Image (cartoon, coloured by chain):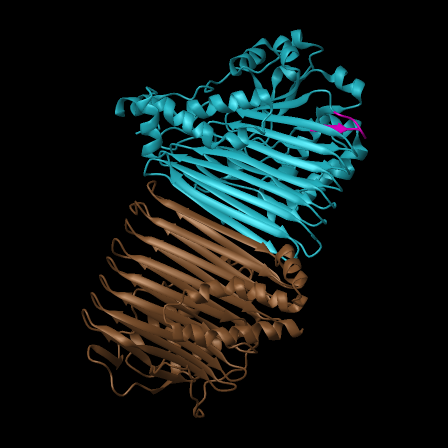
Chain colours: A brown, B cyan
Amino acid sequence: MSEWLQHAIAHADSIQDGFADQRATSLALLTDTKWPSRKTEAWKYTPLRAVERSSAVFKEESPELTPVDVEGLDFLELTFVDGQLVSMPEDLPEGLTIEMQESDLFTTIKPARHIFGLVNDVLAADVAVVTVAENVKIDSVLRINNLLSNGAQGHIRVVVELEAGAALKVVENAEAHGATLTTAYTEFLIGAGAHLEHYRFALQSGDNVALGGSHFKLLGKATLNSSIIGFGSDLQRIDTDIIYAGEKAEAKLNAIYLLDGTELFDLHANVEHAVPNCTTEENIRGIAGDRSRAVFNGRIHIHRDAQKTLAELNNRNLLLSDKAEINTKPELEIYADDVRCAHGATIAEIDKKALYYLQTRGVSRSQAQLMLSFGFINELIDQMPTAELAEWVRPIIRDRFAQMEVK
Amino acid sequence: MTEQIDKALAREYEAGFVSAVESETFEPGLDEDVIRRISEVKGEPEWMLEWRLKAFRVWQEMEEPEWAHLSYPKIDLQSVSYYSAPKSMKDKPKSLDEVDPELLRTYEKLGIPLIEQQMLAGVAVDAVFDSVSVVTTFREKLEEAGVIFCPISEAVHKYPDLIKKYIGSVVPTKDNYFAALNCAVFTDGSFVYIPKGTRCPMELSTYFRINEQNTGQFERTLIIADEGSHVSYLEGCTAPQRDENQLHAAVVELVAMDNAEIKYSTVQNWYPGDEDGKGGIYNFVTKRGICHTNAKISWTQVETGSAVTWKYPSCVLKGDNSVGEFYSVALTRGRQQADTGTKMIHIGKNTKSTIISKGISAGKSNNSYRGLVRMNPGAEGARNFTQCDSLLIGDQCGAHTFPYVESRNPSAIVEHEATTSKVSDDQMFLCRQRGVDPEKAVSMIVNGFCKEVFKELPMEFAVEAGKLLEISLEGSVG
């Protein structure tokens, strides 16, 4: 066990609240879990040095922080600062409730295999539960802000439940101001015929450590549209699980990662087709420049009875520098025969012919590179259903490319 | 249809018989003394024994790997006998006539092309009957060309410099648990050396056959193709039916010097166990080749046998412009489990690799592709293409894909794609509509599915492979 984990566990022991029983369960699991090393399959390419070295602490007093503005959108804000819930939306639309959970912290959606999920179990103090009543469709966007002040450590947990036929848009937004460490887990239960539009923005680059996941359970005919956009940092790791628990459900996952400097970004996407007739589509695109390292693992698991499953995963990567590194592992585990499954993965550099073509038209080489990289990513941004979010994130990505180019 | 299934399920393993040849066999168990005894029986020089003992000490520190998608009871390596030689081998036969007729009959039953058949097929066979090479033919013709093709135990005496230089140079003793074990206890295998600029005049072949009860086979093959040479090597195996699991942990090392080419083809049809998965061979093989500048190594395999297969023929593309290829058909049925694939390590500039893997799962079997493509920082302009297709027959089997793709060079291009499907109703309908019976139809469809791999096999192997697949698939339709 690492020193860092020992400290975390010691801190967990000092927390007094209604979650004590469940915390003990997770603590027992955590104590049995081996601290990941290169030999741990789920952490093969992602060293935990940044966690071990982190000096982020649990702060008694936190400064006031406000999340970034998004033009044209008036969010329902659920804001955590340094792991403490500081604000809840005041006027909630009818059918939407947000409560602080006092006990029974754990749901069964987040799988117990995620070691930092267990850390989150024992360290998350404020747990918010969001519920959308049956057949209620919420127009406003709910934004969950995970804000961290310099030197702080924070652990947040949110549970979102959409009852049958409900609809909700959720943005998970993380902002780190300085050297921080966080675990942020969100669990979504999407009821029969309900629809969730989900975004996870992990745009906090720099010397912070962020671990966490978004985990979804879909009941019959539920639909999920999820977009994940991440920049790297000292360590960024996102785990996502899409679990089908009812037939004819559909999920679409688009993810983008753009890395620079010595950043590290790791996305693990796991899909569990436990029932027949469900459809998954995953599009993952990544660009790694400078000395950065990108890791992607996309597993699709089709259980014995999950006949008539359609599942596709596509992972495309651009490697911009000879010091950068991309490791990808798309996995299929299939136990049913009447299914159509495919995955593809590519790693390459920008098409030299396309670069040349643009240069012959008077576009500078660096400008051409920027255009082509942006085009590669933009396709997925265009697919974001809420246009305001696409408009907001596009210039951020453009700036990121420009910054990558300067080096 | 059910009738056909029942018939096929009841079908006995065709190569399942035990030939009654008296054997000299060690008591089960493994310690340094056993290794000393193996070395002594083989009359090995001191350096070879030292090398074995060093490997044994390394192995003792290692743990059995558990990462593969396989489940089998833990192997008790102390219950395995590490040496078995046919008794009639004590006085080596001067010619084929002196060979134990029982042995020859065994080969005949298996349809190995010896004597006339060999002449016709133009194949030189270094036949391995249990652990000692029994017959080597065509030695003279090969000698003329300067090609060395002999049991590795003989090469240890005759060509110690080559062995010292190359053994363990591609698969180091500490490479993995099973390879280390092999280094310590290997009994025999083939040694091939093709001199500079020589094109081997015929295809070389080893027929492996596990015979004695409780005898693990630890073959070791070393092929060195010197600059500008070319060789095609065939490996095929089949074993008689028995109840206890038998362990096979072979090591194959290929060295392709500048501009050389090695083509290594395997048809593996060991006893897969009965319908409950009882018995059957455990096959843990380490195969790897190293390619120097402009060299090419091509692995082609058709895997239909064994209860458990753990095998990743790999290429280390060290020299610039070198080429690695892997073509595989793996068919599992009954309760067979296969975890197989390849590793392509791109080190040199402009290196190229192609991976075509076809997995067919039927019955209650599990078939996994596990592969690694690594582009090192120096692999300027390197290229890989990987295609893994799985075909499922029946709803009780599993098909899995675990590819690792790692790139550290922006000018390298890696492409991986995998698909999974079943024999479609449309395809079946189309065939049946034309009067093709279902079994034949499946066989046709599967043959089509595997075509890309079969066309890489040498002629005689391609025929055998097609037949093997057809037999293996009997009764899988339903």
Q: Nearer the viewer, residue A73 or B292?
A: A73
Q: Is residue A150 above or below residue B48?
A: below
Image quadrant containing the C terminus of chain B: top left
Q: Where is residue B151 drawn, in percent x and y?
A: 69, 25
Picture residue at 47% right of the left edge, 63% below the top: A379
Picture residue at 57% right of the left edge, 48% below the top: B372
Q: Nearer the viewer, residue B152 or B345?
A: B345
Is B66 a magenta residue?
no
Q: Relative to residue A358, is residue B9 drawn left or right?
A: left
Residue A261 in view: no
Q: Where is residue B49 drawn, in percent x and y?
A: 72, 37
Q: Which image quarter: residue B475?
A: top left
Picture residue at 43% right of the left edge, 41% below the top: B73
Q: Where is residue B144 drawn, in percent x and y?
A: 80, 18
Picture residue at 40% right of the left edge, 58% below the top: A270
Q: Nearer the viewer, residue A20 or A341?
A: A341
Residue B449 in view: yes
Q: Which image quarter: residue A190?
A: bottom left
Is B193 a magenta residue?
yes
Q: Which image quarter: residue A38?
A: bottom right
Q: Is residue A171 above or below residue A362?
A: below
Image quadrant containing the N terminus of chain B: top left
Q: Relative to residue A168, is residue A207 drawn left or right?
A: right
Question: Which residues are drawn in magenta?
Answer: B191-199
